[in-house]
Amino acid sequence: MIEKGQRQDEDTFKLLEKSNGTNNQTNSEQENEIQSDALQRLINLNSAFIFCVIVIITSTFAIIAPFFPLLAQNRHIQGILVGIIFCICPLVQFFADLIIGTYLPKIGVKYCIWAGMIIEGGCILIFGFLPLILDSTQFVVFCIIIRALEGFGTGCALTSTAAYIIAINKEQHIPRSVTMVQMAHHTGHLISPAIGGGLAQLGGYKLPFIVSGSVIIVFSFLVVLILQYIYVNTKISTSTKPIICQFCSPAILILSIGIILYSMSISLLQPTLAIHINSFHFGLAKIGLLLLLPSASYVICCPLVACLMHKIGYRICAIIGYLITSLSLFLLGPAPFLHITLSVGQVIAACLLIGIGGVFIVLSAYPDTLNYVAAKQPIHRKKELIVYSITSGLTNGNFALGEVLGILIGSIFGVSSIDFSWLTCAIAIILLIQVIKLS
């Protein structure tokens, strides 16, 4: 079935191969065809559809956050086990991103998106019925297994969609494509808790999972139908090295560390922010809004930063991002050496700045990583899908790894205000070291 999907990619969808520079014919008639309005409309329509697909996939990330801890508490499940249930999904996604990033051209883009969404949607549906298991031990075991499988499906789908949307657009539109992917990613994060909490309040525990899982499965079949006229080069050499080898490059390692640190900065707020601002006596609704601020500011600033990158360059944008994120963490702590008292305005400003700094870090890291990955490929493969899939796998994998580390480190070291201040200060200092490395 995989081979069939690959042949379908190669034999049926040849229209956009010309627009990506893979066809060597250079006569004026073909150049006019590449620039035709019909071709551009086709690219835009498919890009918009993939944008919606990414939003739907990522909208399930925190769907269990508003109510699952309460269910676990009623089942007398230990906090560490709840943490494992939350972390296992992004942890497996990290490994899935690395695997799919390497072998996506062999598997086939459309097949990988479809299979990933089917696995994710099926797992979400099953998760909604797990409370029917009365034994607490069996309940925890099945939660971990289902969440792990969900993480694998999510990794398959997200890496494939990100690589696809960049591959079908022209090379000069890579920053715009990356902006679309990141806006979709964080829009899903933004609406995820609201979907989970709203549907649970409307129809009980099962409804969020039934609705979300069903929507993902329906869209997985729409992917098969709608993307059938899109072609990307799926040829791959048998000598392709595993994606983990890319970390041997110092430049890629530095860029990866930056994305991991940003992802950590956001995810560590999930288990710690409510405790850290307990003195303000905020309700659950206000705490939830504070947790949404980084994603909200990220989505709003994405187009602006994308335009700014063309004028000042990737490297300067990355440095600005590290400085802004460091400042936000120093304020949120607040850093012990600042000798200031935490205020509500400080918390709001810090949450907003984390998202703004993240835009600069991620949008500048993706094209830079793409250039370094392409430089390692033979000349005839610099614009093939393998370059985009490796870059997508690295970026999504770093995000997932940072999410796992943030939740774990926050749960272990950020439980008190003093520990939280030193923890955020330490991450901010590491971000400043990144600035020195890039300077």
Image: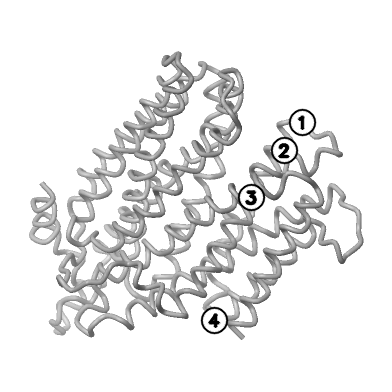
Distance Cα–Cα, label 1 vs label 4: 42 Å
Which residue is at a point 43% across and 26% down the rendered structure image? Answer: 209
Which residue is at a point 58% across and 74% down the rendered structure image? Answer: 318
Q: Quadrant of residue 217?
A: top left
Q: How many marks?
A: 4
Tag 1–tag 2 contact (CB < 8 Å): yes
Instruction: Tell me the kind of residue under disc 1.
Output: Gly
**Crowdedness of circle 4 by 10 Å Cα count: few (<14), some, many (20+)?**
few
Distance Cα–Cα, label 3 vs label 2: 14 Å
Name the quadrant of the C terminus: bottom right
Instruction: Tell me the kind of residue under disc 4.
Output: Gly
Residue 261, position as x, y percentages in the image: 59, 63
Numbered badge on residue 283: 1
Which residue is at a point 39% across and 48% down the rendered structure image? Answer: 92
Distance Cα–Cα, label 3 vs label 1: 20 Å
Position of 236 relative to 61 (above/below): below
* 14 displayed left or right of 327: left
Distance Cα–Cα, label 1 vs label 2: 6 Å
Residue 113, position as x, y percentages in the image: 27, 48
Instruction: Name the N-terminal-most of marks 3 and 2.
Output: 3
Position of 9 relative to 67 (above/below): below
Q: Nearer the viewer, mark 3 or mark 1?
A: 3
Instruction: Name the N-terminal-most of marks 3 and 1.
Output: 3
Distance Cα–Cα, label 3 vs label 4: 30 Å
- Disc 4: which residue: 313
Q: Nearer the viewer, mark 3 or mark 2?
A: 3
Numbered badge on residue 268: 3
Residue 165, position as x, y percentages in the image: 34, 60
Instruction: Name the N-terminal-most of marks 1 and 4.
Output: 1
**Crowdedness of circle 1 by 10 Å Cα count: few (<14), some, many (20+)?**
few
**Crowdedness of circle 3 by 10 Å Cα count: few (<14), some, many (20+)?**
many
Residue 118, position as x, y percentages in the image: 28, 37
